[in-house]
Image (tube, rainbow, N blue to C red):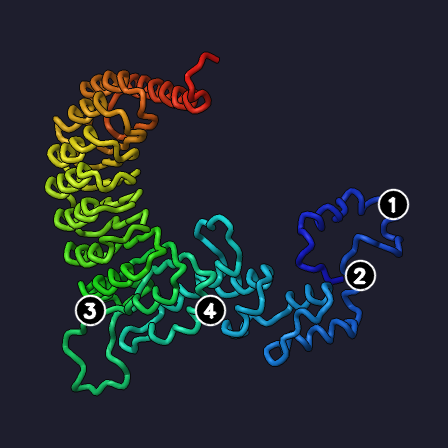
Amino acid sequence: MRIPHNINQSTLQVYTPSTDTTDLIGEQSRKLVSENFEWDKNQCHSLKEYCVAAIAKYFKDKPLLKELPCEDLVYLLDILPLDLPLEFIIPLIDNEHYWERRFVDAFKYNWRTKPVGWDWKTLYLERHCQKMVEEAEPQYEDEQTFDEILELCNLYVKRLFVEQLQMWKPPLTMEKEDIPEIWPIQHISFIPILKKLNNLEEFDLIFGMKNVGVDFEWNMFKVSPADCQKLGKAFQDHQNLRIIRIHRSKLEFRHCQALIQGLVGHHTVQVLDLSHCKIGDTGALCCAYLLKTGTNLKTLNLSNNDIGKIGSEGIGFAMLQGNCEMLHELNLRCNPLGTEGVMGIMRAVVRCAIPKILCIAACSFEDETAVKICQMLKLNDTLKELDISANWIGDDIGDMLVESLESNEIIEKLDVRETDISSEQLGKIQEILKRNVESALLAKLNPSGEDI
């Protein structure tokens, strides 16, 4: 007996008898076993099933869907081939079961967080677009051949994750004497890709290659300014992007400058993540220019980018200009800021209402750095979360930290792991933070301030 896919597996489990039940006297002699779904395992299939199988076999030539009764349609979607062309199947089938079968067959499993309102068709088409982009050969300009399939995927693809890009190699048709001694650093252009995917909201890119084995070359991980210039141009013409992540890549200040040029005047981007690159102070100044000229960024992640005093002071100055009021989170983790670099941010945090979340973990604190942070906590009345973990503070300054927190009724989260403060000081900090959280919750429940 065939169990259709729209029957919940938990329901089937309920009908499965326990071992104690099957061992009862008289069970072995039963002729009608209603809970046995394999009773017809050795019987010939019905004529109806043969007909549905024939429809599935020749579905590309004669796609019958609406003409079939519900029961037969369910069976058809169970056996429909998974290698049908996407150009043919995308506008025709929206059934979740078919796209789940196709996704599992092609990609096995999904390791990313599924967005709100997700469906299997969207997940499959997003991964298919990712595969196309990752396998595209720049020397043949493969991206120019994606127009038809990307136009069909456009209605469904909201996110594009690219975990590798192929490097330029000499085309097979190129004469040996025409092959340059030093291959150009060139990747595919995203201009035609993003032009077709005009509903894209999230873009995630890593320059580099995976699973290269013995063919490893440093050129596989290099990026040219021209690549970033074309990428910035693609962003400039795309007005629906909300999240941009270009991380774990060898981006330097020249690349950052080319990218930022495409984002200036772009008011839909809310998240910019350039973490784990090499943009340095000059690249940080480019990001500061973006903040200064006016942006709706809510999150800026520049962690692990070798940013020091000059870069952080530039970001702090840009925050004070009042053109980035939407900035909610600033992440400068794992940058050698030192005291002067941290002060560049602290001066801005004291004078303006942004950001609400600040991360300066593992930023090479010096003797005076933690003291300056304590002074900031006494003056600031907007910061909600602060991460100063993996920096040296010590017992002496730990007492100052507790004292400064006692006068701060706003901050609700403070990460002080691996800072060498005592357990007693940590306990006091947690009590103060708990007080602030409860006060904020009470204020939210009783905004008028009346006695309850």
**For marks 4 and 3 on the same chain, the one whose residue lies earlier in the sequence:** 4
What amino acid type should be assigned to the residue bearing mark 4? Leu
* Residue bearing mark 3: 185
Disc nearest the viewer among 2 and 4: 4
Cβ atoms at labels 2 and 4 below 8 Å apart: no
Quarter of the figure with residue 32: bottom right
* Residue bearing mark 4: 152
Q: Residue furthest front?
A: 448
Label 1 to label 4: alpha-carbon separation? 61 Å
Residue 383 shown left or right of residue 369 in the figure: right
**For marks 1 and 2 on the same chain, the one whose residue lies earlier in the sequence:** 1
Q: How packed is label 2: few (under 14 Cα within 10 Å), some, or many (20 or more)?
A: few
Label 3 to label 2: alpha-carbon separation? 64 Å
Q: Position of residue 290 (x, y in %)?
A: 20, 48
Quarter of the figure with residue 428: top left
**For marks 3 and 2 on the same chain, the one whose residue lies earlier in the sequence:** 2
Residue 384 shown left or right of residue 119 in the figure: left
What amino acid type should be assigned to the residue bearing mark 2? Trp
* Residue bearing mark 1: 25
What amino acid type should be assigned to the residue bearing mark 3? Ile
Depth check: give the residue in front, 109 or 78.
Answer: 78
- SS category of the residue bearing label 1: loop
* Residue bearing mark 2: 39
Report the residue at 49% width, 59% height from top. Answer: 122
Report the residue at 50% width, 71% height from top. Answer: 86
